[in-house]
Image (cartoon, grey):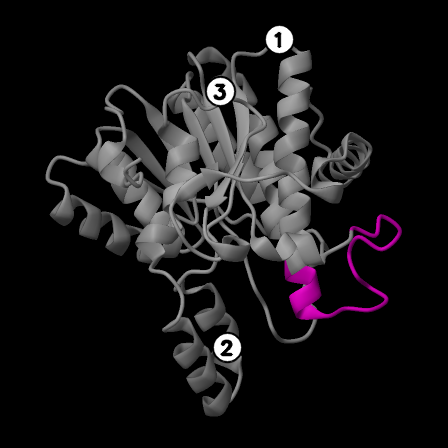
Amino acid sequence: MPEWTASQMPDQRGRVAVVTGANSGLGLITATELARHGARVVMAVRNPAAGERAAAGIREDVPGAEVEVRDLDLASLASVRAFAKGVTTDFPALDLLVNNAGVLHLGPRRTTDDGFEAHIGVSVLGHFALTGLLLGSLGRADASRVVSISSIYHRTARLDFDDLMMRRDFKPRQAYARSKLASTVFGFELDRRLRAAGSSAISVVAHPGICRSNLSTRAYEEHGPVARFIDRATQLAFQSVERGARPQLYAATAPGVRGGQFFGPAGKRQIRGPVTEVEREGAAADPAVGGQLWRAAEDLTDVTYL
């Protein structure tokens, strides 16, 4: 069977998509390919100037592309609420939400505007609130989708609900892995709740394997030249960001995708390779963990839905 690529995406004309973290890396590839196939793309970014430069690049690459940049700081629930209010006003029906943005900080523990540990605050709680606030618009579109982005590192983590913010024993790589486990749990729990509510929307999860994105490059900026050199050298062995984006593009657009599916690379240890459906494992697939995370997220964000 031929390897799936973005060229096989179906026509996206008439669809409206929101992509978080759309100014670089996986998010930029996702926004570009959606626009290339006719979608109207809202690029939700923390740095509007960087977003406008990225949007200009898309328009140059894809003449006639319908892309717009909107300010969204997932580290601020006030920003999430303002963004969601603008989108739901302008787009009563929303076809696609790609919860792509994430952070990897390799320095000391950091917090969001709301006092959350940065990894869980941005990747999980920010997206939890955003999804809930956009759910009305998502529910008005036919067969809308929410795509959450996981990582192979989610398998190395365990969620400690007694210390979700890692105040006792913060380790940055562990914090990143936990945030990706929580993002995965959220994606599957969201789909369970959508099914129970009889919604036509579905929630799907995807991970890129290991690719040459700018996530670790930014994380190493505050480290010395030796660490940055090692990071750059290591990334030469990784797959390209274009290939890394394929699982989330497939999850977002491929016909026949079902809620609760998980997509990633087919190669050894899912590090690289063609897009395939991968197994849901351990805590990520556990409804009890999903329910516990959901209740914690509702309490922390004051956003309640489903």
Q: Residue furthest right?
A: 162
Residue matched to label 3: 138
Above or below: residue 174 compared with residue 78: below
Residue type at mark 2: give it. Tyr
Above or below: residue 277 compared with residue 192: below
Could you tell me residue 193's position as x and y percent? 68, 20
Q: Quadrant of residue 281?
A: top right
Q: Is residue 272 visible?
A: yes
C-alpha distance separating marks 1 and 3: 13 Å
Above or below: residue 48 compared with residue 85: below
Residue type at mark 3: give it. Leu
Residue matched to label 1: 198
C-alpha distance separating marks 3 and 2: 37 Å
Q: Residue drawn at (36%, 73%), measured in percent from left and top?
A: 236
What range is drawn magenta here?
Answer: 159-176
Task: Please say whether residue 181 is one of the residues in the magenta stretch.
Answer: no
